Amino acid sequence: MATTKRNDVKDLALAPEGIRRIEWADRQMPVLQAIRERFEKEQPLAGYRVSACLHVTTETANLMRTLKAGGADVVLCASNPLSTQDDVAAALVDEYDISTFAIKGEDNDTYYSHIEAAVDHRPHITMDDGADVIGVLHSHRREQLGDVIAGTEETTTGVIRLKALERDGKLGFPVVAVNEARTKHLFDNRYGTGQSTIDGIIRATNVLLAGRAMVVAGYGWCGRGVAMRAKGMGAHVIVTEVDPMKAIEAVMDGFQVMTMDRAALVGDIFVTATGDKSVIAKQHFNVMKDGAILANTGHFNVEIDIPALRALAASTRHAREFVEEFVLADGRRVYLLADGRLVNLSAAEGHPAQVMDMSFANQALSAEWVIQNAASLERTVYVVPKEIDDEIARLKLATMGVDIDQLTEEQAKYLASWDEGT
């Protein structure tokens, strides 16, 4: 059906393919399906405007459909210039009547104009993947802060930014850190990022991982997932870390741990997953092997110091789609994947729908929760309530046909008491 809503997508003629892929993903997202069916009946979001800045993928499309089913007036823009699936963006506009601003490969000006379009929607609720909408609202659109009931944030990087705002006393409205939900970071970050990052590297390069030295920078949940999957494919995995607890955990998990200065000498493939900047820098490029491959799976393309790499290069060229070759002064070649952006979404399709089912269930239920509790929320960063987390896990297990035990009354009483000893 044609839409009268504003949009900026590549080509509405791509919509039929987008619809097919959205429907395919939906079949792998039974928890979100169940929420959408309830939302359609109860309309918990009716009358509320939602501005979402997320990766425009098939899974995100099903979240948008769920919010709309709940009565929300939704606008979606891309949270990364390279992560948009153009057929999905077209389908959202043409079939599902959701205002969408996203074009794969959009330039910097277009990217930020799309975020401004989402803010122009004057949202009551924001949904971010990297805190870009919240960033705009807190910088030059502060007059709109009073309109916002609350926001949600999907990423580790975004949560870091929000906690910095909170620490400085400048957070303008409550935000739910969806990233901190156990059903999000234990599964999306570990299993989703692990599989999709490897998928992106292989699609971009078609290299064999077995026998290669893969350096994983950062051993948070995302780094754990990448290391686990790379090891499973036969790579020799090296971990770099700044946190001693995470470093010793990597050692105990069977990985070699060293500094990036040392790892740069021996790595064949490098993956950054830290949320920080210049993790791989000039001194590392200077000693890397000929043919070293650099990829990033953190939210922003600052983890690899790309300006320093460009300054060192005698020449550059595109060796393959999503692969840029840098020829250094001594003839060594270094290959950068997807301009240092999220390789799993730029060169592949992002996380499998089965894990995004839980992540986006958290988004939908958190939006409902902030509306229900708006009067009592303070300007702080909240974790997803335990009852929401537990309900999502329960629903997911049920869709997988998995039964678990229940505490007896006696067992529950024992766990809650202190007076029954050995």
Image (tube, grey):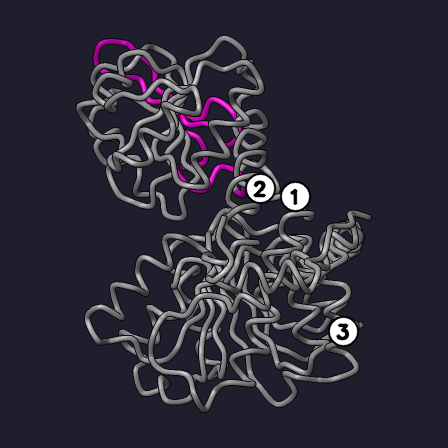
Q: Which numbered disc covers residue 210?
A: none
* Mark 3 → mark 2, Cα distance in angstroms: 34 Å
Neighbor class of circle 2 (other Cα within 10 Å; few <14, some 14-19, many 20+) is many
Please report contact status of discs 1 and 2: CB closer than 8 Å, yes or no.
yes
* Mark 1 → mark 3, Cα distance in angstroms: 30 Å
Q: Is residue 79 visible?
A: yes
Q: Is residue 99 above or below residue 269?
A: below
Q: Which numbered disc covers residue 352?
A: 1
Q: Amino acid at mark 3?
A: Ala
Q: Which residue is at the front of the view, 221 or 352?
A: 221
Q: Secondary structure at mark 3?
A: loop
Q: Earlier in the sequence, mark 1 or mark 3?
A: 3
Give the residue pinned by disc 2.
Answer: 192
Residue appearing at x 55%, y 32% in the figure: 200
Q: Earlier in the sequence, mark 1 or mark 2?
A: 2
Residue appearing at x 40%, y 52% in the figure: 156
Q: Earlier in the sequence, mark 3 or mark 2?
A: 3
Q: Amino acid at mark 2?
A: Gly
Q: Magenta stretch containing residue 321, yes or no?
A: yes
State the image quarter where residue 98 is shown. bottom right
Give the residue pinned by disc 3.
Answer: 2
Q: Which residue is at the front of the view, 119 or 353?
A: 353
Image location of residue 13, percent across then percent down: 74, 57
Residue range (magenta)? 317-345
Left of 223 or right of it: where is 141?
left
